[in-house]
Image: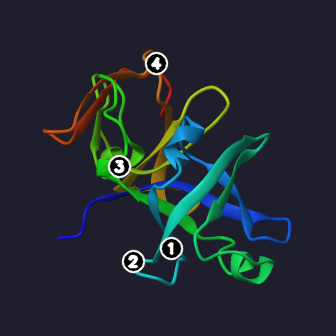
Amino acid sequence: MEKERLTIGKVTGVHGLKGNLKVWSFAESVDTFGRGRQIWFKSEQEETGKEYTILTASARKKGVLISLNHVNTVELAEQLIGCEILISKDQLPEIEEDTWYWQDLYGLLVIDNSLGKLGTIERIFPTNANDMLVVVDKDVPDKNTKGDSEILIPMHEHFIESVDLDAGTVTTTLPDGYCS
């Protein structure tokens, strides 16, 4: 059985001639990219990706600079630009209470205390302040885009009342007029 993998970053470029990669990190700490960790690089066209071992990792202004086993030229590194970087969940440290991995939230039903069912979490993206949940209701078309209705909800205690992974729900308390 394949272990559950989480996306921890994306390759944005190369650095130097020895195959070092510039990575936009989704992790809170550069330690996630620790020496000896097994990671997978997956392009949009691939189902599983290719496995590598991290040799070095260091924090940079806009992410992380890593070197990998068997990637020692700029040509090999360039082939990985645009790939997502995944890691087995069992290689990551236990997370604190009231903290979740993004993948654990995808697909959860969002229910507001006043408005009822809002839809499911389709995407999450970081901002300088808080991660933003993109909640999509496939049953309610957006009159402006002729697509599914989307609501952006900050992952902040003022908006998120509770997350219940076992029940598959996120309960919110949104201010009046938030979704109109």
Cα–Cα gap, marks 4 and 2: 42 Å
- For the question of whether residue 180 can be seen, the reply is no
Q: Is residue 62 left or right of residue 147?
A: right
Q: Position of residue 46 (x, y in %)?
A: 46, 82
Residue 175: mark in rendering: 4
Dot 4: within a 10 Å radius of its alpha carbon, few (fewer than 14), some, or many (20 or more) residues? Answer: few
Which mark's residue is nearer the viewer, 1 or 4? 1
Q: Is residue 176 left or right of residue 80?
A: left
Q: Residue at x 35, y 37 (%)?
A: 93
Which mark's residue is nearer the viewer, 4 or 2? 2
Does label 1 or label 4 sit earlier along the sequence?
1
What residue did someone put label 1 on? 42
Does label 2 or label 3 sit earlier along the sequence?
2
What secondary structure is found at the residue carrying circle 1?
Answer: strand
Cα–Cα gap, marks 2 and 1: 6 Å
- For the question of whether residue 52 can be seen, the reply is yes
Residue 91: mark in rendering: 3
What residue did someone put label 2 on? 48
Does label 2 or label 1 sit earlier along the sequence?
1
Does label 4 or label 3 sit earlier along the sequence?
3
Q: Are marks 1 and 3 in contact (CB under 8 Å)?
A: no
Q: Amino acid at mark 4?
A: Pro
Q: Position of residue 173 (x, y in %)?
A: 36, 20
Q: Are marks 2 and 1 in contact (CB under 8 Å)?
A: yes
Q: Residue at x 31, y 33 (%)?
A: 94
Cα–Cα gap, marks 1 and 3: 18 Å
Q: Residue at x 70, y 81 (%)?
A: 76
Which mark's residue is nearer the viewer, 4 or 3? 3
